[in-house]
Image (cartoon, helix red, strand yellow):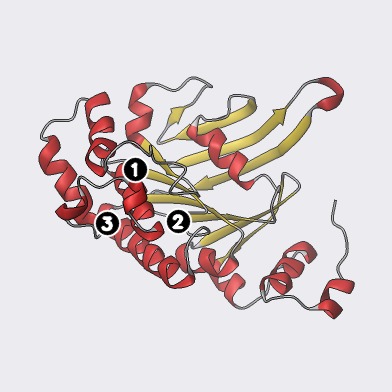
Amino acid sequence: MIRVENLNVTFGDGENSVQAVRNASFTVAEGESFGLVGESGSGKSTVLKAIAGLHSHWTGSIEVDGMALKQKRPRAFRKLLQMVFQDPFGSLHPRHTVDATLKEPLAIHRFDNPEQRILKALDDVGLGPEFRFRYPHQLSGGQRQRLAIARALILEPRVVLLDEPTSALDVSVQAEILNLLVRLRKEQGLTYVMVSHNLAVVAHLCERIAVMNRGVFIEEMTDEQLRSSTPSHGYTRQLLVASKGYDRKAIDRFVEFT
């Protein structure tokens, strides 16, 4: 479903340029859930935004469902692939009701039966019709993220990119959203690419995980390897140690990977 080869993303020009992603290559099968993990600034979200068409300063090859993508994307691509962002409040228009938020993509892509589609989208994510005419500030964080997921899925995409979709939520709400994503993937046959710094979240949702450091893919492993803490690369082992909480003695033994 997704094929990325030798992806490079650079910001700035000349001496001030920064290469955020270097020669990244990976594939994602149809119906698979693929994770990208790494510390802040490692280039995870940049990869996701390049696939989504939100970054245009990239070179290499990106294909989605056999469609070779350029910097400018056709309208059909937006129906094929949608993205859920990290901040559910920042990604929603504060002056648009839930109804307006869901109706807008349907109008842009000329879907019929908007009333039925809106009610179904709300039901799919666990929001009843009583939420339809509320504004984002009248929703909790978890409800806002459910709305963001509904907005992504209302166009019936086959691929969904998830940019840390639970990091802004309380732990109990995180579990609800993750279980929702698992259910929707099974019911709708979706393909996921998920970015997160939370290794437990990725292990719960993804079968394969790629580890990034300083814009480079350094290792790919299965969810079983992640759960059993048996990665092959030293950076990944440090990442696993760090994910278990602050340990001064462990941190003193950390080394810099370049």
Corner quadrant of residue 225: bottom right
Q: Is residue 257 above or below residue 227?
A: above
Q: Earlier in the sequence, mark 1 or mark 3?
A: 3
Viewer can see residue 192: yes
Which of the 4 quarters of the picture holds residue 181?
Answer: bottom left
Q: Secondary structure at mark 3?
A: loop
Q: Where, quadrant-wise, is the N terminus in this rendering?
A: top left
Query: Residue under circle 2?
Result: 33
Q: Secondary structure at mark 1?
A: helix
Q: CA distance from mark 1 to mark 3?
A: 11 Å
Quote the CA–CA distance across marks 2 and 1. 16 Å
Q: Using residue 134 as the reference point, say whether residue 82 is left or right of it.
A: right
* Residue nearest the observer in this picture, 54 or 7: 54
The total of numbered circles placed on residues is 3
Picture disc at residue 125:
3
* Viewer-proximal residue among 66 and 100: 100
Nearer to me, 20 or 99:
99
Label 1 crowd bin: few (<14), some (14–19), many (20+), radius 10 Å: many
Circle nearer the viewer, 3 or 2: 3
Q: Is disc 2 surrounded by few (<14), some (14 to 19) or many (20+) residues within 10 Å?
A: many
Q: Is residue 149 visible?
A: no
Residue indicated by mark 1: 152
In the image, what residue occupies the spot 11% across and 39% down? 115
Give the amino acid at mark 2.
Answer: Ser
Comparing labels 2 and 1, the label whose residue is closer to the camera: 1
Q: CA distance from mark 3 to mark 2?
A: 19 Å
Q: Is residue 162 above or below residue 93?
A: below
